[in-house]
Amino acid sequence: MPKINLSGLRKYTVMFILLALMVLFSFSSPYFLTLRNLTNIVTQNTYFIIVAIGLSFVMIGGGIDLSVGYQMSLVGVVTAMSMVVYHQPVWLSVLIGILLGTFLGFVNGMIVTNVKVFPLIVTIATSTVFQGLSYIISKAATFRGYPDEFLMLTKGAFLGIAFDVWLTLLVVLFASFVYYKTSFGWNVLALGGNEEASRLAGIKTKAMKVSVYTICGFFVAIATMVMISKSNTTNSMFGPGTEFTALTAAIVGGISFMGGEGNMLGLVTGVFILAVLGNGMQLAGWGTYAQYIVKGLILLGAVTFDEYQKTARDTKRSKVNSEPANPEKKPA
């Protein structure tokens, strides 16, 4: 039975880094550790967490999807237009948006599976297509003033906690359940670990690839609903850039860029590390461009550490395989 194989160093280090950052920024600004600010950090990053979880299915399965931000752009304007321009019921508009996002993920999966091109190139290409479609459909207009039923997703609360926070928690628990308790999750881990071995073991690798991209599209669509509800406005510029944050958070949180490894707690911690960095640097008076530099360096460091771990594992495995078996002792 495949298990999530994650280095203990990576698993616990991200948590210590998050705590260290919180302590550091608490000294740099008296407003950082206030309940209001910490609550804002959580509520402002719910859709980033959902996108990162969707992306995790693709990454753990050995792929990559750089089009998620542009999927959000297209799904966002279609959903908004359905409510604001065509005055469709909220439930129908949301259903259209979720089905569209799922379909976009399915398209990515079909292309990656049937066209022997690296997924990075495929999703860069489809991201351009999605963005073009978004601008054509929206005509570069901005849509705002959604129905109250839709705004309840982020404005409403249960037990004092916003509905989108509850939704995010459910998504995290669902993803954890899939990876730890279902054969599908184990197959995704196996696919990312060794695709050829998975195929020989009887796993339908092509179908698995399509499914992880489709699942990613589904979660990206849900995150889009949270994003446009939170802002109560959207246009074709909403969404692009989210893929960078989600990708960085995933790698920082322990999801291997090479596939086959993942941990939902680490993933969520990775999102909050970036959120705390952005919030803390903002309160400390750092400029936006300085934040870009720091986040870029974090991504570079995380990828480098991920490659180092992979090289160390491969070297250890090679040594074990090259060692001759102990000869059996001959009887006296």
Image (spheres, grey):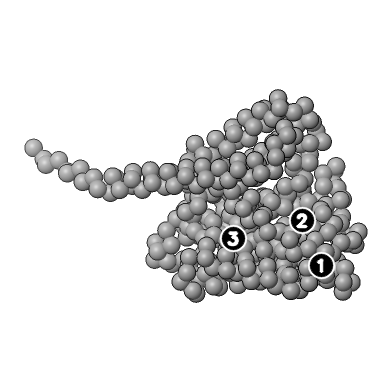
Task: Please state which of residues 27 and 141 is positioned toward the viewer in this rendering.
Answer: 141
Task: Please state which of residues 321 and 151 is positioned toward the viewer in this rendering.
Answer: 151
Give, as a three-letter code, the residue at label 1.
Ala
Query: Could you tell me which quadrant the C terminus lies in?
Result: top left
Instruction: Residue 1 in the image: state x and y as whole percent.
Output: 47, 53
Tell me if I can see residue 127 in this picture.
Answer: yes
Instruction: Residue 106 in the image: state x and y as whole percent.
Output: 61, 70
Q: Residues within 10 Å of mark 1 (few under 14, many from 20)?
A: few
Quote the CA–CA distance across marks 3 and 2: 18 Å
Which residue is tagged 2? 227
Left of 54 or right of it: where is 328? left
Task: Please state which of residues 65 and 265 is positioned toward the viewer in this rendering.
Answer: 65
Give, as a three-letter code, the residue at label 3.
Leu
Quote the CA–CA distance across marks 1 and 3: 24 Å
- Mark 2 vs mark 1: give the one in front: 1
Q: Is residue 256 above or below residue 201?
A: above
User: So how many labels did they put on this image?
Assistant: 3
- Residue at left offset 72%, top offset 47%: 45
Q: Quadrant of residue 34?
A: top right
Which residue is tagged 3? 66
Give, as a three-letter code, the residue at label 2.
Met
Q: Secondary structure at mark 1?
A: loop
Q: Mark number for residue 141?
A: 1
- Residue at left offset 66%, top offset 69%: 130
